Amino acid sequence: MSSHEFAPIGHVSASRRDPEDDFWGGTEARITLVPGLDADALQGIDAFSHVEVVYLFDRVAPERIVTGARHPRNNADWPAVGIFAQRGKNRPNRIGTTICRVLRLEGRSLVVAELDAIDQTPVLDIKPVMREFLPRTPITQPEWCVELMRQYWLPRD
């Protein structure tokens, strides 16, 4: 298997400094481009309502990476499923993605709502969300996912 190296295109500035599983609703984050990438790399992104942010779970220790099946959130009430059948951070390449609402563009920074990445997370890419790239058929998922996500996008009280 060949390997590839990626350099971050930016970093997250956010109030959350620790990875937590729930209560990402109402959060705001700033993605600031790295030196060498000019503001014009973001030109026009604010014409979109949403972006997909691709980022690195850089604080997951290599020994914590899961390559097989496990119970999501270690909850034995949910079935053991393969790491690629869940969105846990301990995945082989430690890559995360989230669709976020665009709030505003400020020079070399993009401010978004509800990015579930912690402060100083390296951002690998930002892509505009286009209706034509969203699923063209109904989405189905197991019931355990609904349970798992029940509090995920609620605001922290």
Image: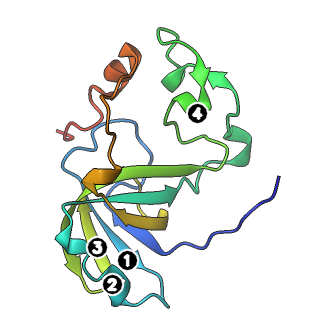
27 lies above or below 64: below
Residue marked by disc 1: 32
Secondary structure category for the residue under label 4? helix
Residue marked by disc 2: 108
Pointer 3 with pointer 4, Cβ within 8 A: no
Using the image, tell me which numbered label, if any, was put on residue 84.
4
| Amino acid type shown at disc 1 | Thr
Q: Residue at x 32, y 21 (%)?
A: 146
Secondary structure category for the residue under label 1? strand
| Amino acid type shown at disc 4 | Phe
Pointer 1 with pointer 4, Cβ within 8 A: no
Q: CA distance from mark 4 to mark 2?
A: 33 Å
- Residue 114 appears anywhere in the view: no
**Mark closer to the chain start, 3 or 4:** 4
How many marks can you see?
4
Pointer 2 with pointer 1, Cβ within 8 A: yes
Residue marked by disc 3: 110
Badge 2: residue crowd in 10 Å (few <14, some 14–19, many ≥20): some
Q: CA distance from mark 3 to mark 1?
A: 7 Å
| Amino acid type shown at disc 2 | Arg
Q: Residue furthest right?
A: 1
The image quadrant that residue 3 belongs to is bottom right
